[in-house]
Amino acid sequence: MRFMVIVKASKESEAGVMPNQRLLAEMGKFNEELVKAGVLLAGEGLHPTSRGKRVKFSGAKRTVVDGPFTETKELIAGFWLWQVRSLEEAIEWVKRCPNPHEAESEIEIRQVFESEDFGAEFTPELKEKDERLRAQVAAKKK
């Protein structure tokens, strides 16, 4: 099972305050544990929303909205993509994670859809195309 583990933003991360050396070292150690356990597939921190954009969709119309965005507790400061056996295992890993911010913070865990989750709507032709695209992406990583 794959899970996206989402580090929620804080006022400080949205203000562009970078983590201190201690936190960077603790996160580096935690990421090393994830790699050694074969759990980590990807993980990155994100710039604040003041450097971001959103594209709103309304039918065929697209509107670009400049950041920053409000509601800090709903924003994302970073993420991991993990491969684990269960949601419970993902929860146990998150409990071992250093606090990603100096203040109170929150990490969200969301399961990633797999092709079988889409049922009959995901036809053999669509599945084959998806597998081809994933193979192309994997080949670029090498």
Image (cartoon, rainbow, N blue to C red):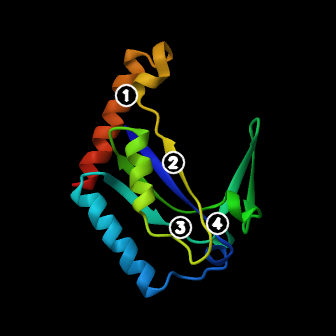
Q: Which residue is mark 4?
A: 52
Marks 1/3 in contact by CB < 8 Å: the verdict is: no
Query: x, y percentage for residue 58?
Result: 78, 40
Q: Residue at x 66, y 68 (%)?
A: 49
Q: Nearer the viewer, residue 113 or 39?
A: 39
**Mark carried by residue 3:** none
- Occupied quadrant, residue 52: bottom right
Residue 79, compared with residue 68, is above or below; it is: above
| Secondary structure state at the residue bearing disc 1 | helix
Q: Which residue is mark 2?
A: 109
Q: Locate the N terminus by quadrant.
A: top left
Marks 2/3 in contact by CB < 8 Å: the verdict is: no
Query: Tag 3 or tag 1, which sits nearer the N-term?
Result: 3
Residue 97, compared with residue 116, is above or below; it is: below
> What amino acid type is highlighted by mark number 3?
Leu
Q: Nearer the viewer, mark 1 or mark 2?
A: 2
Q: Residues within 10 Å of mark 2 (few under 14, many from 20)?
A: some
Q: Nearer the viewer, residue 137 or 68?
A: 68
Query: x, y percentage for residue 53?
Result: 67, 62
